[in-house]
Amino acid sequence: MLMTMKDLLQVANTHNFAVPAFNISSYAMLNGIMAVSSEQRAPVIIAIHPDELRHIGTDMLESIVAKAYKADIPVAIHLDHGASFEQVAVAVQSGFTSVMIDGSSLPFEQNIALCQKVVALAHAANVSVEGELGTIGSTDPQAEAGADQIIYTDPDDAARFVAESGVDCLAIAIGTSHGLYPAGMTPKLRLDLLGQIKAKVSIPLVLHGGSNNPDEEIAGAVAGGVNKINISSDIKAAYYRAMREVLKDNGLREPNMIEPPCIEKMNEVARQKIALFQANGKAGLY
């Protein structure tokens, strides 16, 4: 069933689990993620970055919405890292049930003002809004853009930001970076900071850039109150690593022979993330 992200995350906030937001960039990936989420009886957020939306085209959104409506699990369709009011407006018109407006690189007051403008538009169409305060790092040139230096979210600023912006959930910066981490790099989440933010902010909190973080840290973030975790690089790496292996057989040319093993490798990662976020079996709560 198709839902807003606000409704999806309110249940997660009440029951202390995180809903996975899987970035998809093809219909095959969408089918795989929907199938494994249904298998695990887990709510899911289908996240689409503006770069991914340009790749698949807005015309495909009609099919994604139809698939979500028919699903036997709760599904939200989310614009990931919308960079402008105009991008968000197109997403709202195209059928997204949730949008992110990423004003994290703007001065604090400008970030609030941009979120307020987006909230006014989106809420009028019953579309949820995610804001971001603080900056996510970037360690991978192929991944979503990030800042050269992580600016951690200040708990007092977060409380004011939520109160004044009107956003439905807040992406926070506690030490993650977009993309796959370089060999030898050991990321460290500020779970102490998460606790301080959670004490001052009542809406659901979001974690971006969680690929390659140790499972125990991600589990700690879920226990500490994160209710949405974005996963992009991990599932794509598994999918295309499998595809490179499959295509070593030069005789293969049909998608129905090439894609299934790639989807299964992707779904192995997705299953593990769903369990790690304690989202498995939670579809029955909706």
Image (spheres, rainbow, N blue to C red):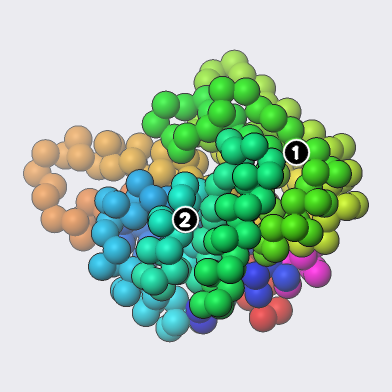
Range covered by the magenta-colored residues: 11-17
Q: Percent from the top left, x then y, of residue 222?
A: 75, 51
- Residue 11 higher or lower than 177, as above or below: below
Mark 2 or mark 1, which is nearer the start of the sequence? 2
- Residue for point 88% across, 52% down: 200
> Which is more toward the observer, 85 or 6?
85
Q: Residues within 10 Å of mark 2 (few under 14, many from 20)?
A: some
Indicate the amino acid at tag 1: Thr
- Asked whether 14 falls inside the magenta stretch, the response is yes
- Residue 226 in percent (x, y) is at 74, 53
Residue found 27% across the figure and 51% down from its top? 55
> Residue 250's quadrant in the figure?
top left
Which residue is rendered at x = 26% and y = 59% of the image?
A: 57
Q: Is residue 167 left or right of residue 194?
A: left
- Figure check: 65 above or below 276: below
Main SS class of the magenta portion in the image = helix
Q: Is residue 174 above or below residue 80?
A: above
Q: Amino acid at mark 2?
A: Phe
Residue assigned mark 2: 85
Q: Secondary structure at mark 1?
A: loop
Which residue in the protein does label 1 denote?
Answer: 153
